[in-house]
Image (cartoon, rainbow, N blue to C red):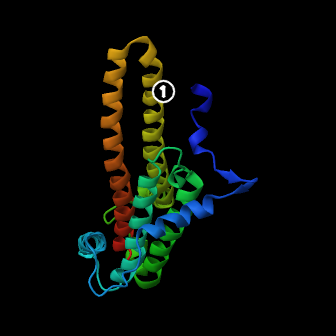
Amino acid sequence: MNENLFASFITPTLMGLPIVLFIIVFPNLLFPSPTRLVNNRLVSFQQWLIQLVLKQMMAMHNPKGRTWSLMLISLIMFIGSTNLLGLLPHSFTPTTQLSMNLGMAIPLWAGAVITGFRHKTKASLAHFLPQGTPIPLIPMLIIIETISLFIQPMALAVRLTANITAGHLLMHLIGGATLVLMSISPPTAIITFIILVLLTMLEFAVALIQAYVFTLLVSLYLHDNT
C-alpha cells in the first residue's frame, strides 16, 4: 500500500507521451454551449449557478474590474470541475501538481499587479509604505511588503495543491486500511468504510470550496489594483 501511495499523482502517459493536456481539456465537455431555444434543466441550472457566483464575485468591482468577469468565471468552473473529476476512481487530478497551479496563479496575479501599476500607480506604490510609518522602519517595511507581494501567487498555488493532495492521500490511506481490515476485523472495517464515505462527501465540498477560494483571492487581488 505504501509504495503506491503517490501513484495517483504521477502524470499519466500513453505510449510514453503525457496525456495531461487531454485531461485538462476534458472538463470543457461538461459545460456545453446551449443550442436550443429552451434549455434543459441541467443547462438552466448551470447558467443560474454561474450567474449567482458571478454576481456575488463582481459586486465589489468597478467597471474596469468587471472586464475580468469571463476570466474569473472560467477559472472557477475549470478548477471546480477538475477537482470533482479527480475524485473518480483511477483518475488524475491536475490541480495536485504545483507546477500547474503556479501556471494559473502567476499570470493572473501578474496581470492584476500590472493593471494596478498602470492605472493606479500612486495607490499601488503606497501599499509598500503604510501612512505614518516611522522613518527608521521605512526600509524594513518596504522589503517586507515587497516580499509579501511576491509570495501571493505562491500562496495561491500551494494552498490549492496542499488541500487537494491531502484529501486524496487521506482517502487512499483509509481505503487501503478498510481493505486490510475486511479480513482481520469486519466490524472495524465497517467503521472505517463509514469514515471513508463521510470523507468522500467532505472532499466533494472541499473540491468546490477550494475552487471558490482560489478565484475569490484572485478577485481580491484584482480589486486592490483597479
Image height of 5 relative to 203, above or below = above
Whole-percent x and y of residue 151?
49, 56
Depth check, front residue: 102 or 48: 48
Taking the spot 38% from the left edge, 58% from the top edge, the residue there is 211
When asked about the image quadrant of residue 218, the answer is: bottom left
Image height of 29 relative to 196, above or below = below
Q: Is residue 78 visible?
A: yes
Depth check, front residue: 113 or 58: 58
**Residue that extends furthest to the top in the rendered view of this protein:** 184
Taking the spot 51% from the left edge, 60% from the top edge, the residue there is 150
Taking the spot 36% from the left edge, 78% from the top edge, the residue there is 69
Give the position of the N terminus as an image quadrant. top right
**Residue that extends furthest to the right in the rendered view of this protein:** 16
Image height of 109 relative to 121, above or below = above
Give the position of the C terminus as an image quadrant. bottom left
Answer with left or right where residue 127 lies relative to residue 86.
left
Depth check, front residue: 98 or 130: 98
- Residue type at mark 1? Gly
Whole-percent x and y of residue 158?
49, 50
Q: Which residue is mark 1?
A: 176
Taking the spot 32% from the left edge, 66% from the top edge, the residue there is 131
Image height of 223 relative to 179, above or below = below
Q: Is residue 134 visible?
A: no
When asked about the image quadrant of residue 61, the answer is: bottom left
Say what secondary structure mark 1 lies in. helix
Whole-percent x and y of residue 194?
30, 29
Q: How many marks?
A: 1
